[in-house]
Amino acid sequence: MVMNNSLFDGSILEPCTAVPANHVLRPLELTDYRKGLMDCLSNLTLTGQVSEQMFAENFEEMQRAGCYFIIVVEDLEAAKIVASGTLLVEQKFLRGCGRVGHVEDIVVAKGQQGKRFGVTLVKQLLALANATGCYKTILDCDEDNVPFYEKCGMQRKSVQMALYAPDAAHK
């Protein structure tokens, strides 16, 4: 049972004046499935077949966990999600049981690039990581995206490694 329509309490977000007047930056809501969130995410990678029920169940699981912070930019006139980004807060035993923020899934819908939605999302997520007590925030990106994230204040560090499950291509 979903406790609230929002994934998390939006009052912890920094006030945002960087989006146009007919747009709003806010936490993910359960109703965003119908506002095209999956279409927006498909600009990033394969989304697979996600039904509204699957979306609701995943939303509830994320909400219950309390460590997922997905923010979106909604075009209020079109009632469409035009950008999205995720912060996952990982609890560690290292650094005195510190927390690490993981920025994931930064996406801006086609036709919406150039409006600084991506920079705004990343800066909001970095501020949110700080507000939730993360001692560092990390992300993985393609080499082509390094300059963008450097503009957001991040620095190149370490190397990413990956191992995909054998059937991951089908999901």
Image (cartoon, rainbow, N blue to C red):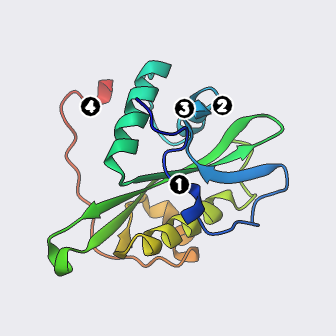
Q: Earlier in the sequence, mark 4 or mark 3?
A: 3
Q: Judge the density around disc 2: few (<14), some (14-19), many (≥20) Cα neighbours within 10 Å.
A: some
Q: Give the residue at mark 3.
A: 38
Q: Give the residue at mark 4.
A: 168
Instruction: Give the mark toward the camera: 3 or 1.
Output: 1
Residue drawn where x is 43% and y is 69% of the image: 129
Whether 104 is drawn above or below 131: the answer is above
Q: Earlier in the sequence, mark 1 or mark 2?
A: 1
State yes or no: discs 4 and 1 in contact (Cβ < 8 Å). Answer: no
Residue 89 location (% of width, % of height): 34, 61
Instruction: Give the mark toward the camera: 1 or 2.
Output: 1
The local secondary structure at tag 3 comes to: helix
In three-dimensional space, the C-alpha distance between marks 4 and 3, rounded to whole angstroms, equals 18 Å
> In front here: 107 or 27?
27
State yes or no: discs 4 and 3 in contact (Cβ < 8 Å). Answer: no
> In front here: 69 or 4?
4
Residue drawn where x is 46% and y is 73% of the image: 131
Q: Earlier in the sequence, mark 3 or mark 1?
A: 1
Instruction: Give the mark toward the camera: 3 or 2.
Output: 2
Quadrant for the C terminus, please.
top left
Q: Judge the density around disc 3: few (<14), some (14-19), many (≥20) Cα neighbours within 10 Å.
A: some
> In front here: 46 or 28?
28
Q: Give the residue at mark 2.
A: 35
Q: Give the residue at mark 1.
A: 9
- The residue type indicated by label 1 comes to Asp
